[in-house]
Amino acid sequence: MRIPPIATKPRLNNCGAGDFLRELSARVVGQSQALTQIVPYVQMHQAGLSPEGRPAGVFLLLGPTGTGKTRTVEALADLLHGREKHLLKVDCGEFQMEHEVAKLIGAPPGYLGHRETPPMLTQQKLGSVTSESSDLSLVLFDEIEKAAPSMTRLLMGVLDKALLRLGDNTTVNFERALIFLTSNLGAREMHSHLKPGFGFEALAADASGVSLNKLHYIGMGAVRRHFTPEFVNRIDTIVTYQPLDPGALEGIVDIQIAALELHIENRLAERSFELEVSAAARRFLLAKGTSSEYGARELKRTILRELTQPLAAMVAGNEVPPESLVRVYPDEDGVRLLIDVIG
């Protein structure tokens, strides 16, 4: 299956409800159930019907690693604002100590280092991730379970009243923001359920037949053990991502290669060339870059290592003439990819 390169221009203003979901599903493959729970909040904001005094939506994204949780937020940013990185991201792994959480709101006036440590979450920064096509900010707290407990206490007011009070006593309003919390809570138990290590279940295990309700039940148990009921009750929707089946993984390979083709066209301009990646080469990348444990997490790095870097070396050495055809296929032993240039 060949998927054409996806346009990067925001399409929100031209999309109906079904069109927007299809556009998003083309970017986040194999997670239609998860996306169906998120898209209505975007539409409520677009219609001006989001609740007052609360964020436009608060989501906790659960599921096995490499299934598209962070990718969903990036795809939304691409659709709403035209760039995948047009979002405010907080890597919670950097806030594992209690004192580090203070960096988010800054030190109060009069405290040592007040001017040297500006807050990370400000109204200006929130506004900087909007665009002419949409005034909806996307805020991502990645791997929220890694943050110190004071992080969740800090977020209580944001999730409930859409307000964050900074160290200088000013406030940040999150009413025009979608807040995403991603988490790997329960991921190990989910993987054990998907791939049992022994017994009859190990013989019968099949990721494509696993009940999403069962995974959601496992994830919810881990969430309730880790977070307080007060925090969980302030989340609008807890979304569980299902394992990617072979068809979805093939679709992700096609999307990544289409993105590489678009990158070649945009960056090389008049020196660009046509890239033809055979079905066998796609299967090679699929086998190298995906696994039951990590999903599609390694796929982008595999394409970079096995395809982009050798191709770049040939371009740098003037081995690829403009407008030529470059064919990619695996060698007879299936150990590496071969690249042929046809003038």
Image: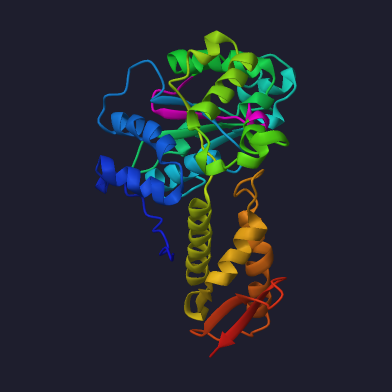
Mark count = 0
- Residue at 31% from the left image edge and 30% from the top image edge: 45
> The magenta stretch spans which residues?
172-189
In this rendering, position of residue 111 left or right of residue 297: right
Of 238 and 160, nearer the camera is 238
Q: How is the image coloured?
A: rainbow
Query: Where is residue 78 drawn, in percent x and y?
Result: 43, 48
Most extreme residue toward the front, as rendered? 200
Q: Can residue 67 be seen in this view?
A: no
Name which residue lies at 51% across and 17% down: 164
Give percent across and percent down for residue 170: 51, 17
For residue 7, above or below residue 319: above
Residue placed most toward the observer, 105 or 326: 326
> Residue 2, relative to residue 77: is it above or below?
below
Residue 227: in sight, yes or no? yes
Magenta run includes residue 257: no
Decide which of 241, 98 is in the foreground and name it: 241
In the image shown, does 26 or 124 lie closer to the viewer?
26
- Quadrant location of residue 130? top left
Q: In this view, does 105 lie to the left or right of 276?
A: right
Q: In which quarter of the image is residue 153?
A: top right
**Residue in the image at 55% along x and 29% along y:** 215
**Residue 247: percent from left, percent from top:** 48, 54
What residue do we see at 35% from left, 29% from top? 41
Image x and y of residue 62, in percent? 55, 30
